Structure formats: C-alpha cells, structure tokens
Image (spheres, rainbow, N blue to C red):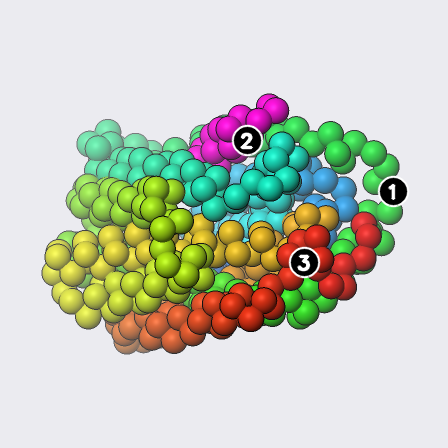
Amino acid sequence: MTNEAGVTRRYALLAGVQEFAIWLPLPVLVLHMSERGLDLALIGFAFAVRAVCVVVLELPTGGLADAIGRKPIALASQAFTFVSFVFLLFVTGPVTLFAYALFQGIGSALHSGALEAWYVDRLRSTNAGVALQPHLASIAVAQTAAMLAGAAIGGTLPALLAGLALPWPLAGFGVALLAGLVLRAVALWLTLVLVEEPEFVGPRRSAALGTVSIVRDGLRLARNVPVMRYLLVAGAAMGMAIVSLETLWQPIAGLTFGADPEGSAVFGVLGFVLGGAGLLGSLAVMRFGHLVPGGAPVLAGLSQLVKGVAMLVLALHAGALGVGLGLGLAFFAIATQNVPHDTLVNDAVPAERRSIMLSINSLVFFIGVAIGSATLGPLASATDPRVALTVAAVVTLLACGAYVGVAVALRAGAITRPHAAKGAAGP
C-alpha cells in the first residue's frame, strides 16, 4: 500500500463494511425497540445515555489513540459495538436497553478518533500535499453505497422472512439485528487485517501521561484555532439533527404506513430512498464539490440549510410524498455536508494531534446527540413525533450561521494550518 489510491481503496472497503453493518438494522431499529414494549421517551433516554458515555469518554479515548496507536483503539471499538448489538438483539426492557446504550457509547467513543486519523496520516505519508476533499468524498461514496444497500436490505428483511415463523429473538424485526451482528464480526476481522500501523510499534510505557498531555493540547487547539470554534458549533447541531432523524423518521412513517413487521417492506423502500439520496450526495461532492464558489464552508453551510428545510418537510407534510421527499433531501444534505465539514476539521489540525481533535469534534457532535435525545424523545412521546422533529429542524436552520463564521475566519486568514498550530506540544 504505497500510493494514494491503494490507501483509499483499503479504507473504503473497511468503512463501507462498517457502514453496511450500521445500516442493516437501522431502518427498523426503533420499531424493534417499540415492538419489545419500549416507548419513545425511554428510547430517547437510552440514546441520551449512549451520547453521555461518548461525551465522558471521547477525549480520553482520542488522546489514547494518539498515544498508543489507532489500530488497538479501533479493534476495541469494534468489539464493544458488537457486544452492544447482542444486548439490543435480546432487548426486553430497560436493563438490556441501557446495557446496549452503555456498550454502544463506549464503542462510539473509541471509534471516533482512530480510523479516520489513521487513514488521513497514511494518505499524507504517501503525498504530504494531497487534497483531502476528493479522497474523503470517495470514502463517503463507499459508505453511502453501503448505507443504501444496508438500509434497503435491512428494512425489507423482516417482511421477506415473516412467513418462516422464526423463533425469538429473531422474530419480527430481530432478524435485521442478527444480520447486522454478522457484519459487525466481519468489520472487526477487516480492521485486524487491513489496518497497518508501523509508526506505533515503539514503546508505549507513558500512555497515561501522554494521553493527559494530548487531551490538554487538543482542548487548547479547540480554543485557539478560530475555525475550530465555529466547526464545533456546527458539529453539535449535526448531532441533534441526526439523532432526531434516526429516532423520529420511523414513528413518523409509521403514522402514514403502519408499523407491523409483515409490512416492513415500505421501510425497506424508504431505506432505499434515504440511502440512494446519500449516495447521490456523496457522488455530487466527489464530482462537483470543488466547483462550489467559496469552497468547503459554503458547501457545508448550504447543505445545513437544505437539511433543515427537509426536516421541516418531513415533519409538516403528511403522506407518502412528504415522508419520501423529506427523508431523501435530508440524507442528501447530510452526505454533502459531512465531507466539507471533515475536510475543514482535518485541514485545521496538526497530524500529531489528529485523533484528539477528531475526538473533540465527535465530542460536541454527541453533546448535540445527548441534548436532542434527552429532549426530543420525551417531547415526541408527550405530543407528536412531528412536533419534536420541527424543533430539531429550527435548531438546524439557526446553526447555518456557524459556517458563515468559518467563511469569515478563513477570509481573514484566521485558520491555523497543521504545521503552524499554536499551543500543540510534542507527543
């Protein structure tokens, strides 16, 4: 693996399999929990617990990845996530639900600062001046293609197998969870095989002290690099938006189409719609993202605007057209926002602190997830899922101003390039 294309192909395979594993159960995840007797308030609270776990562990795990290596942290992430979905497959009440949330939170915290940092550094080791956005867009295409396949298959699988009278816990929507577990095991094996990290073969005796120092440096960078401050605000809004869509689109669609396992094919169709929209968004960024006047901050800001409008469409327009159009536009915009946002983050941080800075970015994302989960789930349960999604849409629209701040800071020359970052000490 000595060239840019080889590095990108390897990471695209790994990232695609991970995304496939995520999306196989996702189109029926909330329906699976509801079928097991859990209401939206409890589900929202569990998602908040998951997010709080990430918030608490995000910085230590990101610092640890910079201190001892990205591969061991990535392997631990895959293992914790696998166990979390075992709990979810067997969920029967609050105890197993919160066990899922705890292990999922630990796995997510371990994941955020590891593999992407490994990929970017390996890419730049082949070409120090490589432009990140085209490569990140290629990875996004692989991920959204996997999302498309996973969402379509996972949403349809319960309906296809409903006539087999599968035993518990596979009955109903559980079979989609089992399929996701199998892919989780594959992702764990691929991480072991594909991720090579010779730069971290050396001594690791000072991991604890090194982690503390790295976390301190990361927080200093987040404070001192003007672009990062605006990106972190945008990241928090992204977290609230995605958790509101993940939690609420299935109940909203259920109000229109019903929510029985035998009729889950409609959720497969909707999964195909949102996956196809995400794939189109990723392809659009890969082919045309560099043509957007104003570059990455303008593309990310416009995407945030479209996403907020799409969430309003999903919330306010009843019927099949409103659900399909709202979902499609929202996930198209998510795909077109992620790549420029991640490009801006990676360009603003030094390589030796990449994991911790990506973890800080993930930290604020999950703060948004925690706030959204803790407030929108109970609001949806007390009123209507569409009311809760409307609130999230308004927050999303207001957060477009963060990218205006990024653009102004870049125009003023306020970005700190990786080789000139203030406040970063040595490893």
- Does the magenta portion include 20? yes
- SS class, disc 2: helix
Neighbours of disc 2 within 10 Å: few (<14), some (14-19), many (20+): some
Please determine whether, in this image, residue 194 is positioned above or below residue 128.
above
Please determine whether, in this image, residue 323 is positioned above or below residue 178.
below
Name the kind of residue labelled 2 in the image: Glu
**Depth-wise, is mark 1 or mark 2 nearer the camera?**
2
- SS class, disc 3: helix
| Residue 84, horizontal then vertical, whole percent | 52, 45
**Depth-wise, is mark 3 or mark 2 nearer the camera?**
2
For disc 1, the marked residue is: 205
For disc 2, the marked residue is: 4
Q: Is residue 13 at least partly visible in the picture?
A: yes
For disc 3, the marked residue is: 59
Q: Earlier in the sequence, mark 1 or mark 2?
A: 2
Name the kind of residue labelled 3 in the image: Leu
Name which residue lies at 52% across and 61% down.
Answer: 366
Name which residue lies at 58% across and 52% down.
Answer: 346
Q: Earlier in the sequence, mark 3 or mark 2?
A: 2
- SS class, disc 1: loop
Measure how far apart labels 3 and 2 are at the Cα level. 29 Å
What is the quadrant of the N terminus in the image? top right
Front residue (pair 203, 119): 119
| Residue 224, horizontal then vertical, whole percent | 68, 69
Front residue (pair 318, 144): 144
Front residue (pair 259, 183): 183
Which range is magenta? 1-23
Q: Classify residue 297 as left or right of residue 174.
A: right
Neighbours of disc 3 within 10 Å: few (<14), some (14-19), many (20+): many
Front residue (pair 242, 100): 242
In terms of image quadrants, where is residue 128? Answer: top right
